[in-house]
Image (spheres, rainbow, N blue to C red):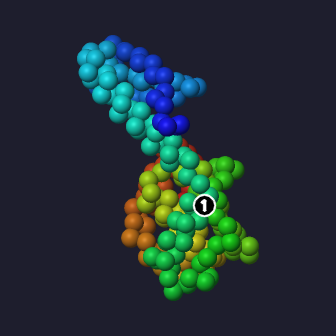
């Protein structure tokens, strides 16, 4: 099958590395960094494990705008059902020009844009950011009614904490208040 070909793998052993294993793409090959003391069997096991992790990560990065719209519709059904007509966006898309915020919404044209930085985050964080922007289609400001809508999402506080931690760690965008 096309697309299932195993990439060229370069294993680099390090005497300084004790327990950790990491991998990254370098062009068409994958470089796997392992401790020098690993056996050949451990090396083989870790190469397979790291290839699976890279594939999962790249799958997350390949999330499409169509998938994002489908996710938005699911969130509307779950958390904003009473506002089904008001909460439906005209467009939802990933963008690469938002480095100062996680997402944005323009209620006038019903468009939602989600930063590409969110693509690698856990599903429940993506859901939170998307629901936050969907709520702006109903309530444009960050007032009590808006936060009540966002609060319908059960992992709302957890996701806000996650985003605050990412922002603090990378000195990125503050979470809207």
Does residue 9 lie above or below 134 as drawn?
A: above
Residue behind mark 1 = 66
The picture places residue 60, in percent across and down from the top left corner, at: 50, 48
Q: Is residue 18 visible?
A: no
Left or right side of 56 for 15: left
Does residue 4 lie above or below 76 as drawn?
A: above
Q: Farthest residue toward the right?
A: 109
- Give the image quarter of residue 91: bottom right
Q: Which residue is drawn at 38% across and 70% down?
A: 154
- Give the image quarter of residue 152: bottom left
The picture places residue 31, in percent across and down from the top left corner, at: 46, 23
Q: Can residue 128 be seen in this view?
A: yes
Q: Residue at x 69, y 50 (%)?
A: 97
Name the secondary structure under disc 1. Answer: helix
Quadrant that contains the C terminus: bottom right
The picture places residue 78, in percent across and down from the top left corner, at: 45, 76
Q: Which residue is drawn at 61% across and 76% down?
A: 88
Q: Farthest residue toward the bottom?
A: 82
In the depicted view, which residue is nearer to us: 60 or 132? 60
Does residue 145 lie above or below 74 as drawn?
A: below
């Amino acid at each position: 099958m096309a697309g299932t070909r195993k990439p060229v793998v370069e294993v680099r052993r390090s005497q300084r590395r004790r327990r950790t294993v990491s991998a990254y793409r370098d062009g068409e090959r994958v470089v796997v960094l392992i401790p020098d003391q690993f056996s050949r069997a451990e090396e083989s096991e870790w190469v397979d494990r790291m290839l699976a992790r890279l594939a999962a990560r790249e799958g997350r990065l390949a999330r499409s705008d169509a998938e994002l719209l489908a996710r938005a519709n699911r969130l509307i059904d779950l958390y904003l059902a009473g506002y089904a007509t008001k909460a439906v966006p005209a467009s939802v898309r990933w963008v690469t020009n938002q480095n100062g915020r996680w997402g944005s919404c323009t209620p006038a044209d019903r468009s939602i844009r989600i930063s590409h930085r969110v693509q690698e985050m856990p599903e429940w964080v993506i859901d939170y950011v998307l629901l936050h922007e969907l709520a702006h289609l109903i309530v444009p400001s960050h007032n009590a009614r808006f936060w009540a809508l966002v609060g319908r999402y059960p992992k709302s506080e957890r996701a806000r904490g996650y985003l605050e931690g990412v922002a603090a760690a990378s000195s990125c965008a503050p979470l809207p208040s």
